[in-house]
Image (cartoon, rainbow, N blue to C red):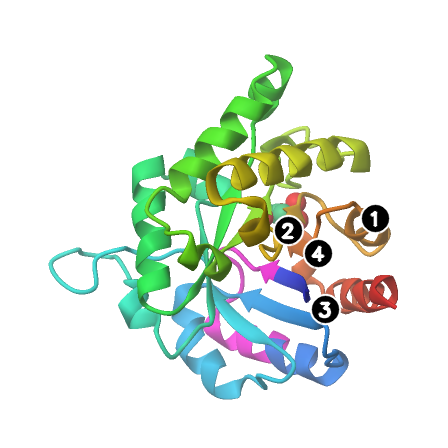
């Protein structure tokens, strides 16, 4: 399986800055057959960057989408409108769940719409610090995972990527903590266990599961060697070209 290195730029960079930053990335990063590098700029930058990008080096992702194709949905951008611009769409990021109050129902509709439109959904799940302290991690992961995948058929499961992002480890969370490889390994095995129970072990073998939460070039190697992990979702460090590039190089070394 490929290793996925996904940079989520969140609401950073103007369109001009994004273009300059992409130019810098394209100059520095090297393409490796086993590594899929993906960047998720803000929606306004997707169209211009889609013209500028070298798809051998990088693919584009949207940070969100709406599940209806067209219509009276002021302010929304549908997956149908993203077709041709992006290969991936991040769905259910914790900032969407907790700041914008997205429900599991919204998220499952978006996952299904992405699959219908031929765009790979990256379904984000993860417990908050309170949920972790109350021993609710497994229930939360199971609910978010199976809730998000409720409308996905067994055949379509292979079109999905899952990203485990404990909210308490995301660098922008107040008092964020670094997740230990042991913590992450436990959650990844829970995620795979619940996927297998629903879809069968054979189908789940090929489902990429990524980790996200304060990843940087110094810890990327340890995270990438956790069993069951197939890549990283990176926020803060994806905004600093040398760090993002170094993480790609770490991924390459881990693969060798
Ligand atoms: C994220 O918000 O998806 C994320 C992983 O951010 P960071 O890498 O900054 O913790």
Q: Which residue is mark 3?
A: 241
First in sequence, mark 2 or 1: give its number: 2
* Front tag of 2 and 1: 2
Question: How many numbered marks have been drawn onto this rendered protein structure?
Answer: 4
First in sequence, mark 2 or 3: give its number: 2
- Give the magenta part as a residue range: 7-21
**Is 128 left, or right, of 35 in this rendering?**
left
Q: Which residue is mark 2?
A: 210
Callout 1: SS: loop
The question of residue 219 being in magenta is answered with: no
Residue 17 in sight here: no
Disc 2 + disc 3, Cβ < 8 Å: no
* Front tag of 4 and 1: 1
Which mark is on residue 237? 4
**Is 6 left, or right, of 197 in this rendering?**
right
Instruction: Work out which quarter of the rendered image holds the N terminus and state it.
Output: bottom right
Other residues around mark 4 within 10 Å, as few (<14) / some (14–19) / many (≥20): many
Task: Say which residue appears at 65% left-offset and 81% top-offset.
Answer: 57
First in sequence, mark 3 or 1: give its number: 1
Q: Quadrant of residue 97?
A: top left
Where does the image place residue 149, in percent across and percent down from the top left?
41, 44
Q: CA–CA distance between discs 2 and 3?
A: 21 Å
Q: Which residue is mark 1?
A: 219
Task: Say which residue appears at 57% left-offset and 67% top-offset.
Answer: 39
User: Where 22 sits versus 61, above or below?
Assistant: below
**Is the C-beta of the residue carrying label 4 under 8 Å from the nearest atom of ligand 1?**
yes
């Amino acid at each position: 399986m490929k290793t996925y290195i996904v940079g989520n730029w969140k609401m950073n960079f103007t369109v001009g800055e994004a273009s300059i930053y992409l130019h810098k990335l394209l100059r520095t990063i090297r393409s490796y057959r086993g590594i899929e590098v993906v960047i998720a700029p803000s929606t306004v930058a997707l169209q211009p960057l889609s013209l500028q990008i070298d798809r051998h080096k990088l693919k584009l992702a949207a940070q969100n989408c709406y599940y209806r194709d067209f219509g009276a949905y002021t302010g929304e951008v549908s997956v149908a409108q993203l077709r041709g611009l992006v290969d991936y769409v991040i769905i259910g990021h914790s900032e969407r769940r907790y700041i914008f109050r997205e429900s599991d129902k919204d998220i499952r509709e978006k996952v299904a719409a992405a699959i219908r439109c031929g765009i790979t959904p990256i379904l984000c799940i993860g417990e908050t610090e309170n949920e972790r302290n109350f021993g609710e991690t497994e229930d939360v992961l199971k609910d978010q995972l199976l809730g998000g995948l409720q409308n996905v058929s067994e055949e379509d499961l292979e079109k999905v990527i899952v990203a485990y992002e404990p909210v308490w480890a995301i660098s922008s969370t107040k008092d964020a903590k670094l997740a230990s490889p042991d913590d992450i390994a436990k959650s990844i095995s829970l995620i795979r266990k619940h996927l297998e129970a629903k879809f069968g072990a054979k189908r789940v073998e090929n489902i990429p599961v990524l980790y996200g939460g304060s990843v940087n070039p110094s810890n990327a190697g340890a995270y990438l060697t956790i069993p069951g992990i197939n890549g990283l979702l990176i926020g803060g460090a994806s905004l600093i070209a040398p760090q993002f590039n170094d993480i790609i190089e770490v991924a390459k070394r881990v693969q060798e």
